[in-house]
Image (cartoon, grey):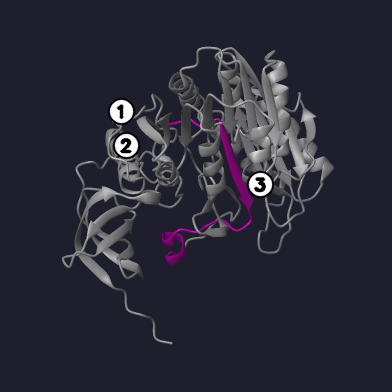
Amino acid sequence: MRKKKDVILENIKLFAAGAKGVAIGKTEEGKTVLVSGAIPGDVVNARVKKSKSKYFEAEVKEIVEKSPFRVDPKCVHFGTCGGCKWQNMSYEKQLDFKQEEVYNNIKRIGGIEDFETIPILGAEEQYFYRNKMEFSFSNARWLTQYEISSEENFGSRDALGFHIPGMWSKILDLKECFLQEDPSNAIRLAVKKFAENKGLDFFDVKNQEGFLRTLMMRQNSKGEWMVLFQLYREEKENRTQLFDYLLEQFPQIKTLVYAINPKQNDSIYDLNINVYFGEGYLMEEMDGLKFKIGPKSFFQTNYKQALELYRKTLEFADLKGDEVVYDLYTGTGTIAQYVARNAKQVIGIESVQEAIDAAIEHAELNGLTNTTFYCGDMKNVFNDEFLENHPKADVLITDPPRDGMHQKVVEQILKLSPEKVVYVSCNSATQARDLALMKDHYTLVKILPVDMFPQTHHVENIALLIKK
């Protein structure tokens, strides 16, 4: 079969940032072009990947003129890894585009014009801000085009790093990563070197065999570390040697845990966790509140910005101490704990039982007696019967996943009719969709975008709504 000839769009001026980190331009005929691998301000020749009726999806073939917002990326893996797509853009412009995206989504999708936009809350730390990272082992690392085309020996094919975007079986072997502070890089490199020297088997994704499968590292704000290994099979002697070596080399490791995972996926949530060293968890503290962080716990990965997010959420709620607060999608109850100290009663709802168990434990740990948590699918639990059997909410806080709220949940909020709604979102497009459903009953007073993930296109947003 004859190979299709590439369609190249020439001299496309990119003028805006779009969803998922693409840059937006237009052809001379006015058709929109979504270009990956470029930033706003670039002029590019772009190779079309998909042609839709209203737009092209394309990738950079050649940069004709560089954007004035371009900077040199710090990481040698930039462009291959896919983790920090905006590392080649100045941080100031990253913030500008994030704020613009949130504002435009609320106006365009939400159909709301008149609201205050507080300047985006940028991060003091633009690198090394994550407190949790996960890496995968592979016996067939990703080869660069240079390696493939050269006649040089590839050397070791073992890898410990990230999945190549869109290629689950391909792992990029990481030399460095600027997302988690040391000793993260040192631990990862030490694990790989020890494993190769000892001849330990790295995981074979295609054939589902091997020994070492994944490595996860978590840290708390006190500089204490948790290390979690997923092993495809048990090899007690090799496991013990590796773990003891790490504990000897890195005294920062306060707990080391592992799981045997012979499944076809890397999810740990249905696995038994074995504690090899330490307590099996880390303790974290935020503004005097204590949280127990285990291997399976959900906890915001950017501690410092999460702290600001929670403080601003509490500020938006503006509690006086006599309010009943509903916290939808409460997770492990972090926001609920924050507001409970300033409220009469807090009622949290969450779909994951393990998260609810953690929320209850955290409330007990913090001596909070005015919190109640319920588990179940939000649209099924948060229903008419629930509203009839619980006190009316004065304030409602909602922090849904990226898909936003189910329409039934929005309808129940309107029935509940709290005086104030604080909507925390990690996806301003679905947030705007939900706000559109509420705008006849609520006034959007103000929004505050928060940058939780520098060097990426992701942005959180807090919105305050007051009943009309």
Quarter of the image that includes the C terminus: top left
Mark closer to the chain start, 3 or 1: 1
Number of residues whose C-alpha sits closer than 10 Å to that of mark 1, classed few (under 14), some (14–19) or many (20 or more): few
Please tell me how crowded label 3 is: few (under 14), some (14-19), or many (20+) other residues with Cα within 10 Å.
some
Q: Is residue 107 visible?
A: yes
Return the residue at label 3: 196
Disc 2 target residue: 99
Q: Position of residue 256 (x, y in %)?
A: 72, 31
310 to the left or right of 352 = left
The magenta-colored residue range is 127-150
> In this view, which residue lies farthest toward the bottom?
1
Which residue corresponds to the image point at 23% horizontal and 65% vertical from the top-left?
Answer: 31
For label 2, the SS is helix
Q: Is residue 292 above or below residue 351?
A: above
Point 73% across, 23% down: residue: 361
> Would you name the residue on which mark 1 appears?
119
Residues at marks 3 and 1, CA–CA distance in whole angstroms: 49 Å
Up the image or down, 164 lies above or below 382; here it is below
